[in-house]
Image (tube, rainbow, N blue to C red):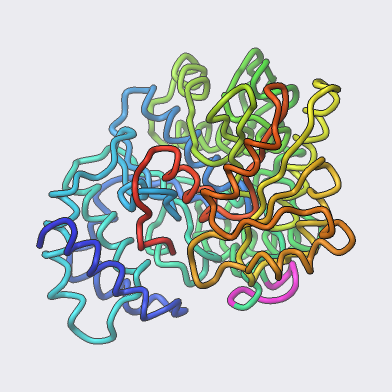
């Protein structure tokens, strides 16, 4: 198929929705000869922070000289962002060729979901590309996630918070149980700072599977500031003067998870020097997470979309206000309607001088009027601009050179804005 036809085929798989269970992905991978067993892996799950942690881990492994596969989701602008080797997106021709190869296998039995097909494709691409290690981000939950067909060198669960309750359960304990499904027999696992109830669930899973458990804030920790310098107290190592371009206090915990994974991977046979750790961490990039894309005024894109991520964004905005007392904050906000709109808005909207409501170009997106209802009293002064291009234009008109414009509430909205800034069209494949 051509690349455009490939995109159309992949987009069509979204009609199968999200389906719990590993039978279909297991069949696909078996038919391919189990490509995921051809290279060692690191598996990273969690409600928030798993993508940043995966990006840090991949950057450090690459700096160590390894050929590194990185599988993440969702993408922001280009579908190929999901599947990378040494930072380079899967080529269009390779994506089309692998899709052709998998289509006959997918036609047998229960049709795969979009994410199942994509995961099988990624695992096969990494095998074809002869990666030496792959960093794999969980898509949704963990226990029944298509990525859970790997047996990694080590795993991480960055955070557990209320999100995707329709699939994972309505309590922290239920969600933690799903995420702890990535813990494998005898495979060490790192966790971020979890609420006591969630931590107990993960600890039980680790004990049952004889998996050594390392917790940020206990067996490992990071203190300081990611951008200006921080110290890591690890499982065995102690490092100071580390830096990472990913801003925000929450990134310290993500860095601690990534660094602990490096220690565990090194202990299990992957060569990773301190020099590589410093170099890789220092040049980590991860789009759409407190990402500064323009200055004067400062334009920041952050894909926060639930209250826990909203709290991290609110902390960043408070710190920015403290350091720039004359600057105003203009918030461009758009969310999916299945998220906790009121909870998120209640955290970030009070820190904004102006609020511009918009919506990502998806049927799941909350309308500007639904968002206004979630804002409560603050809605009376909000600007309504349903199209992201119009919302960005409104924000720029409102902002002076010293101000900050923050686009947030959804990775899909962030992707729409990044596409606008690049002058390219939107991808129909956004799940």
The residue lying at 44 percent from left, 46 percent from top is: 42
Residue 16 locus on image (x, y percent): 37, 81
Question: In the picture, residue 116 is in which quadrant?
Answer: bottom left
The quadrant of the image that shows the C terminus is bottom left
At 72% from the left and 53% from the top, the residue drawn is: 383
* Residue 18: % across, % down: 45, 76
Q: Quadrant of the N terminus?
A: bottom left
The stretch of residues the image draws in magenta is 167-174
User: Splitting the image into 4 quarters, where does residue 318 fall?
Assistant: top right
1 left or right, relative to 188: left
Q: Using the image as rendered, state which of residue 338 and residue 185 is in the foreground.
A: 338
Percent x, y of residue 12: 29, 74
Above or below, 385 against 247 in this view is: below
- Residue drawn at the location 64% of the way across and 13% of the way down: 241
Looking at the magenta stretch, what is its main secondary structure? Answer: helix
| In the image, residue 390 above or below residue 113 | above
Q: Nearer the viewer, residue 159 or 211?
A: 159
- In front: 384, or 346? 384
Magenta-drawn stretch contains 336: no
Q: Is residue 188 visible?
A: no
Whether residue 32 sits left or right of residue 292 in the image: it is left
Horizontal relation, residue 8 to residue 76: left or right: left
| Residue farthest toward the front in the current orientation of the protein | 397
Residue 114: where, in percent of width, then height?
Answer: 34, 70
Establish if 127 lies above or below 396.
below
Q: Is there any visible trace of residue 172 in the rendered image? A: yes
Q: Residue at x 34, y 45 (%)?
A: 424
Along the horizontal axis of the image, is 234 left or right of 270? right
Q: Residue furthest bottom?
A: 109
């Amino acid at each position: 198929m051509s690349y455009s036809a490939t995109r159309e085929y992949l987009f069509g798989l979204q009609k199968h929705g999200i389906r719990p269970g590993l039978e279909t992905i297991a069949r696909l991978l078996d038919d391919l000869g189990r490509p995921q067993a051809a290279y060692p892996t690191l598996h990273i799950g969690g409600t928030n922070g798993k993508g940043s942690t995966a990006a840090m881990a991949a950057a450090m492994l690459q700096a160590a000289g390894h050929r590194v596969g990185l599988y993440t989701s969702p993408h922001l602008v280009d579908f190929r962002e999901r599947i990378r080797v040494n930072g380079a997106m899967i080529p269009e021709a390779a994506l089309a060729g692998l899709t052709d190869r998998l289509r006959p296998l997918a036609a047998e039995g229960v049709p795969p979901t979009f994410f199942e097909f994509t995961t099988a494709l990624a695992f096969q691409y990494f095998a074809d590309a002869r990666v030496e290690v792959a960093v794999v981000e969980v898509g949704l939950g963990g226990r029944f996630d298509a990525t859970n067909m790997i047996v990694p060198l080590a795993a991480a669960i960055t955070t557990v918070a209320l999100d995707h309750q329709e699939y994972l359960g309505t309590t922290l304990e239920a969600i933690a149980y799903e995420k702890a499904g990535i813990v494998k027999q005898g495979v060490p696992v790192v966790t971020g700072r979890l609420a006591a109830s969630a931590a107990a669930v993960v600890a039980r899973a680790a004990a049952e599977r004889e998996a050594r458990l390392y917790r940020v804030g206990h067996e490992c920790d990071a203190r300081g500031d990611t951008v200006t310098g921080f110290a890591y107290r690890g499982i065995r190592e102690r490092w100071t003067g580390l830096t990472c371009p990913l801003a925000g206090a929450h990134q310290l915990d993500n860095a601690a998870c990534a660094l602990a994974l490096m220690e565990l991977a090194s202990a299990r046979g992957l060569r990773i020097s301190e020099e590589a750790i410093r170099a890789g961490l220092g040049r980590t990039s991860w789009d759409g997470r407190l990402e500064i894309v323009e200055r004067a005024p400062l334009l920041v894109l952050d894909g926060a979309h639930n209250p826990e991520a909203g709290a991290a964004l609110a902390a960043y905005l408070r710190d920015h206000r403290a350091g720039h007392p004359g600057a105003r904050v203009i918030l461009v906000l758009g969310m999916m309607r299945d998220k906790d709109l009121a909870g998120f808005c209640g955290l970030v909207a009070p820190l904004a001088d102006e609020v511009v409501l918009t919506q990502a170009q998806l049927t799941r997106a909350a309308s500007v009027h639904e968002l206004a209802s979630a804002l409560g009293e603050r809605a009376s002064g909000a600007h309504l601009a349903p199209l992201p291009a119009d919302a960005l234009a409104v924000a720029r008109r409102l902002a002076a050179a010293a101000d900050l414009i923050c686009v947030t509430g959804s990775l899909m909205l962030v992707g729409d804005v990044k596409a606008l800034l690049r002058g390219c069209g939107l991808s129909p494949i956004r799940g």
